[in-house]
Amino acid sequence: MPTLDAWRINFTADPYCDMTAIVRQLYLLAHNTVVFLLSPVVSLQPMEPQICKIYLAFTNSVVISITSTIFCVAVGSMAAYALARIQYRPKFGNIMIFVLLTIGVIVTTNYAGVPWWMSSVVGLALFFFLARALGRHFKMSLGNGDILFWMISQRILPPIVVVIPLYVMFQAVRLLDTHLALIVLYAVANLPIVVWLMHDFFANLPIELEESAQLDGATRFGIFWEIVMPLTRPGLAATTLLILVLNWNEYLFAVFLSTVKVQTMPIMVAAKNTGEKGVLWWEMCAVTVVMIIPVIIMSVLLTRFISKGVLLGAVKG
């Protein structure tokens, strides 16, 4: 197991060091990084406390980022396909009823001491009853374009504004400082981006392919899974890579909603900027190298799908 000193690159010993020395130092950095990643698997000897923290943060980042990306892309793709093929006409009055009942649920949960699950069930029941009873009296309705604009407009809101409400909410449902809280939060935060990007890919597909499949007896989900998704594979790969990078580099929510138990790599890198010994550049370089490895691997794996989509779009006929 390499110690932290093994990651130090000594460029200051000789100000006129040649390129061979630099390459040798970079090779040692890469070698010790690989040994660090594989040592917990192939060795049973105890690791240094600092290495244990880095390995724990790396594992947390992998689990949280990949899980939230899969969930976000799966749900967002289905929502984007629905908005591209089905015309929705939600009544504006029903939306306002839902917003008011949501505010009522939050108030009763935080100030009246009612359990969150009970207030949520009662709020949903009231919403369905009022929407059924009063919905026919509402005239103003929205369209798919309004829904898309509303979803992407959620990204305009600064994340710092919702940090405290999210902290209170996760604390109320006892999900604070858990993997599930960050997974759900990352997926929901990036869901509008997936819907917005994938909607354009689905809308540009010829609908005649889906109509032919329907005549052959294919179901809506079968058409989506077996016909639509393979045709939009380049767009799906690009969207997945973008969401993975956003989840992997997310810092604000992780630093407010987690501790050492579910600490992620961005927090570990930022921690090297503060300390009694000042900025630990050698440790920061080592942690940064470990942090960028999964993104590079995913980029290499998804590049061929993205390149194929670019070439197909550039060839006429």
Image: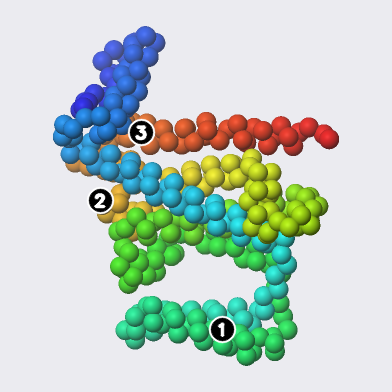
Which x, y percent locates residue 36?
A: 28, 30
The quarter of the image holding the C terminus is: top right
Which x, y percent locates residue 141?
A: 71, 77
Mark 2 and mark 3 residues within 8 Å of each other at the beta carbon = no
Q: Earlier in the sequence, mark 2 or mark 1?
A: 1
Marks 2/3: CA distance?
18 Å
Q: What's the residue type where badge 3 is placed?
A: Val
Tell me the tag on residue 202. none
Which x, y percent locates residue 219?
A: 68, 59
Front residue (pair 308, 103): 308
Q: Is residue 303 left or right of residue 159?
A: right
Mark 2 and mark 1 residues within 8 Å of each other at the beta carbon = no
Let me know if residue 36 appears in the view: no
202 over 234 or under it: above or below? below
Let me know if residue 260 appears in the view: yes
Tell me the tag on residue 128. 1
At horizontal 55% and vertical 53% (from top left) the residue drawn is 74
Front residue (pair 19, 184): 184
Element assignment for label 3: helix
Element assignment for label 2: helix
Instruction: Tell me the residue that label 2 is attached to.
Output: 260
Toward which corner of the image does residue 284 lie, by quadrant? top left
Instruction: Tell me the residue that label 3 is attached to.
Output: 290
Residue lying farthest to the front in this orientation: 217
Marks 2/1: CA distance?
42 Å
Q: How many marks?
A: 3
Q: What's the residue type where badge 2 is placed?
A: Val
Q: What's the residue type where badge 1 is placed?
A: Phe
Q: Nearer the viewer, mark 2 or mark 1?
A: 1
Circle 2 crowding by C-alpha within 10 Å: few under 14, some 14–19, many from 20: few
Toward which corner of the image does residue 167 lie, by quadrant? bottom left
